[in-house]
Structure formats: C-alpha cells, structure tokens
Image: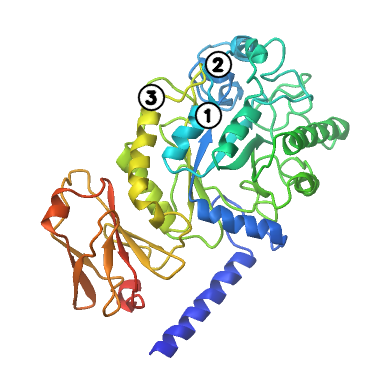
Amino acid sequence: MKSKQRNRTVLSLVLVALVVASSSVSWAQHQDSVDVETDPAVLKKLEWFQDLKFGLMMHWGPYSQWGIVESWSICSEDEPWCQRTMDNYVQYCEAYEKLKNTFNPVQFDPDAWASAAKYAGMRYVVFTTKHHDGFCMFDTKQTDYCITDSSCPFHTNPRSNVTKEIFTAFRNAGFGIGAYFSKADWHSPYYWDPYWAHADRNVNYSIAKHPDIWKKFVQYTHNQIEELMNGYGAIDILWLDGGWVRPENKDQDIDIPHIAQMARSHQPGLIIVDRSVGGRYEDYRTPEQTIPERPLGYVWETCMTMGKSWSYVPNDAYKSSGTLVHILVDIVAKGGNFLLNIGPDAQGTLPSESIKRLKDIGEWMKINSSAIYSTRPVAPYTENNFRFTKQRDGSIDAIYLVGRTTTTMPHKVILESFVPAKGSEIQLLGVREPLAWERVGNGVVITVPERVRNNPPCIYAWTFRIEKPEEANESANE
C-alpha cells in the first residue's frame, strides 16, 4: 500500500512539474508560452517570494484629492469604473490634469506606513510608481507630469520623491520591494497623440502607419523603468500593469525582453510580472479581487482591495478584520500570496479604518504567523472550516476559521484529513500544553480544555499543529 502511495506521490510531482513547465491557461484569458524562466537567480527569488505570503499594495496619486477611482475616469470607455463627475469630457480631463498643481500631501510619513504594515505581518510592498494616467510618483527626467515638478506644491518637501522615500522606509523595515509601473501612459503624447481622439484605453494611432511615434514611446518607457531600476536601491519585483499593451494587440510591442535584460542588469534576479500577458516575463500570476477555488500550477498572488476601491475613497466600505484573516488563510492554504491594497488619502495618511484592521491582523499574526510564512499547500487544502498548510519539517497546520457568531471554542474538534502518528502531539498555537486527542474511525477528535475554550489565544481563526502526521487519508482527498 505504501509503495503504491509513494508511486502515486512521485507521479503527482511529475505532473505538477509538467504543468509548471508547459503551456497552461492562465488565471486571466491567455495561454502561457513554453518560453519559461530559467535564470537561477530569478528562480531563487521566486522561492523567496513564495515564503513571504503577505504584502501591501498602495494606489496613490493626485486623484486621491477627489476621492475617485485611479486614472480610469479620463478613459472614455463606457464602463462603470470610467464614470466622471462632469458632463463635459474635455473640461473634466483638463481639471484632472490640474490636480498636479494642488497635490500637497504634507502628512506623508512612509516610516509610519511601514510600521503599520510590519505590525500586521506584511513582508513586501508594491507601490504604484506610475498608473495609467501617466502621473509619476518619482523623480523622472522624462516628463514634467510628476510629483517633483516645480508646478506641484509638494516638490519643495524633502520627501517629494515619494517612491524613493517609500522604498527606503519599507526596505529599512525588512520588506521586499515591488515597483508597480503602468505600461500604458495616457498623458504621454507618444501613446495618446493629441492629434487624434482616444476612444478607449489603447494607443490612439496606427502603429503600422506611425512607427516613429511608437518608437519614441518605447524609448520613453524604457528610460523611465531604467530610472526606477538604477536609482531607488534594491528592487525585488517589477509589477507591470496595463496588460493590453502587448504585441498581439494593435502591435503594442514595447520590447519586454529588452526591458527585462536592462532591468536585471541593474537588479539581478528581479522578478518581473508582465501581468495577463503570459510567457517568460510573467514570473508569477496575479488574480485580481478573487481567490482560486484550488491551488494553481504556478506561482501566484491574489491582489485585492481592503475596501471596494483601489484608490482612496471617503467612507469606503472596508472588509472586516476577520474576513481579511480568513482571506489570507484561504489564499496561503492554496499556495498563493495575499497582496492587500490600501489607498492613502490626499494628505498622505492611511485611513484610520485601514490602520485598525492592520492592527487586528497583526494581533492574530503574533500567534499564528508560523502557520503562514514559508509554508506550502498540502492536499486536500480544505475541510469544512479547516484550511491546511505544510511546514518544511512535514508538520501540518490545520487552521480553523471561526464563524462570525462564534465566541467560544468547541469542546471537541473533529478532523478527518490528517491524523497524528502514534505517540505524537497536537498543539494549539498560543497554548503551551499539547491537546488531548484520540483516533475515531478515519479521523481524529481533539479535546479543547475548558480554560482554553473560555480564553482562546486569538480570535478569527485557531491553528492546530499536527507535529507528526500520518499520510493524508485517501478518502479525505478524493
């Protein structure tokens, strides 16, 4: 029996390797290329990335003054996220561009941001250095549409190069550093040429007819990315958004191979996320605002908003702390990372509701972080309220998601997917003494003492660690 199970395990590992190395359907709407990454430094960093599990994303720019969705209101597509507060589109775009002239986030304190994120247990940050509207939150020399330009009142502030300040503060706090960069640029005359109207998010001229204009845009993009890669310290992730900018869509080829070569010449081992495009330069996938039902055959992270909006919106509806902990656990149990987005306000502060939730998550992580960091998924991944993670030493963490109305722990906890080996222990994280357990049928019944039930080590979710599990029950995995 064990020989068959061993053979089955080897076969499963081979199949997983084939899935990762061959063509597969991505979380977006494309098929992957067989051209996969082979650089040992990049592969090593991807392993490092998978150990981090929890990160902070921030969408921030002049649009925060209006409390509106980032960038999209200047795009004339008929979509809910492209709505405007004025009837006249031209006047609206002019007013939007002038937001640069009043953007003055004098309360900006990146050290406070890093401190709040670190307390929550986050381990990497991805910051929007430039969104689709083209406004640069760094000291670019390629355009004056940036936060350090003399027409932006914040340019006199010693922290005006906010990208550099954010990266420095988070790096000093031990974070991995990710630079979000939009490949599209709706302010650049080389992408939205002022001679033609722009009906949608795409380049507004024929690249085949005007290759000279597109060539300027390609160089403009390369120059800006090189600025970020060569003047902002160690960068771990280049997070490229604007997936419609791709060769097969209106010939929008910005030469990603050259970008990768150039960026990695400055940042060896750099992870590149050419999101939704696939192939060699999408080192990991980024399902947006959703969680896969099952583990995926490649490295991935879910990027999701804490509220409803990516950017700051007054009185946004934030997810509860318990919901966020459950999302984190569910994602990690399926082998992913959780990149949680918060939009700073116009003054440069994180909304108080988001700070409260970061503190709540941090309190839970104080007890349970070892069941999150550096773990890997293990079948069957879920069982009723349980989510499973696996430690490098082979122990299993069964994380019990607490219902909204649950205030005390149950006296008996039943688990079928994993059982301890004879003579081994089950530990409840945050409780010193091991818990009593007994085999019942194909599963195990764990007894929680009354004193622990009445004073649980944490709220939201409890972790039962099986230090020496037997092989997973076949019936539970079917």
Distance of mark 1 from mark 3, alpha carbons?
A: 16 Å
Which residue in the structure is indicated by mark 2? 105
Position of residue 142 measured from the top left corner of the image (x, y, whole percent): 79, 25
- Is residue 219 visible in the rendered image? The answer is yes
Between residue 76 and residue 317, name the one nearer to us.
317
**Residue type, numbered disc 3:** Ser
Asked whether the residues under the numbered discs 1 and 2 touch, taking CB atoms below 8 Å apart as contact, a structural biologist would say no
Question: Can you name the residue that lies furthest to the right here?
Answer: 212
Which residue in the structure is indicated by mark 3? 352
**Residue type, numbered disc 1:** Asp
Which residue in the structure is indicated by mark 1? 111
Label 2: how many residues lie within 10 Å, few (<14), some (14-19) or many (20+)? Answer: many
Label 3: how many residues lie within 10 Å, few (<14), some (14-19) or many (20+)? Answer: few
Circle 2 sits in a helix, a strand or a loop, which is it?
loop
Between residue 231 and residue 21, name the one nearer to us.
231
| Mark 3 or 2, nearer chain start | 2
Position of residue 375 measured from the top left corner of the image (x, y, whole percent): 45, 60
Between residue 167 and residue 280, name the one nearer to us.
167
Please determine whether, in this image, residue 250 is positioned above or below residue 451.
Answer: above
Between residue 349 and residue 98, name the one nearer to us.
349
| Mark 1 or 2, nearer chain start | 2
In the rendered image, the quadrant that contains the C terminus is: bottom left
Distance of mark 3 from mark 2, alpha carbons?
A: 16 Å
* Mark 1 or mark 2, whichever is nearer to me: 1
